[in-house]
Amino acid sequence: MTLLRTLLATTFVRYGLASVVALASDVALFLAFLRGGFTPAAASALGYGFGILVHWLISSRLVFAEGAAPRGPERTRQKGLFVGAALVGLALTTGIVALGSIIGLLPIVAKLIAIVVSFQTTYLLRKAFVFAP
């Protein structure tokens, strides 16, 4: 139990768990959109967009709660920065999936590569700029 508490006290671990939840919603929609006939890049962008919303809700309440701004202009600014970081991740994800499609990778393989790159990038941006005290 002490190890679990120690892990959950670590921002990176909480961020990782939040990312898993957001990722699950992202990938579920990605696969649904692929089945619906969307291009891999469009399906990836739409799934990622929904994942942004899920991630904000978890991050601002459980991951970076101590860095969350109070309601008002500062909170609005913080939401804008969060979305900005997410858009960087979205651009990386969409670009990697599109490139993977061009070079013949299976869409899910390209998506997995994009997940790793986007996760690291958005974590660093959010920790350093969005929720920095």
Image (spheres, grey):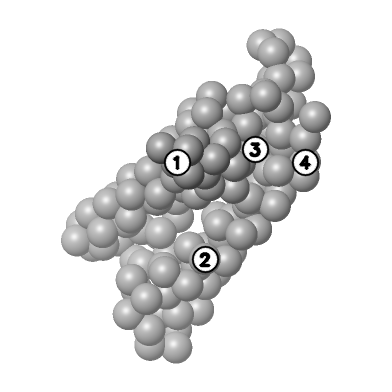
From the top left corner, tell me how far across and down residue 101 is, in percent.
41, 79
- Residue drawn at the location 52% of the way across and 28% of the way down: 62
Nearest the eye: 107 or 109: 109
- In the image, residue 75 above or below residue 80: above
Q: Residue at x 80, y 29 (%)?
A: 133
State the residue in front, 123 or 28: 123
Disc 3 secondary structure class:
helix
Res. 4 mark: 1
The answer for how far apart the CA atoms under marks 1 and 2 are is 24 Å
Residue that mark 4 sits on? 129
Local SS, label 4: helix
Marks 1 and 2 close (CB-CB < 8 Å) = no
Q: Give the CA distance from mark 4 to mark 1.
A: 28 Å
In the rendered image, the vertical position of residue 44 relative to residue 51, given as above or below: below
Q: CA distance from mark 3 to mark 4?
A: 9 Å
**Dots 2, 3 in contact, CB < 8 A:** no
Q: Is residue 7 left or right of residue 36?
A: right
Q: Which mark is residue 82?
A: 3
Q: Tell me which residue sits at (71%, 43%) in the image.
A: 127
Residue 97: x percent and y percent? Answer: 46, 71
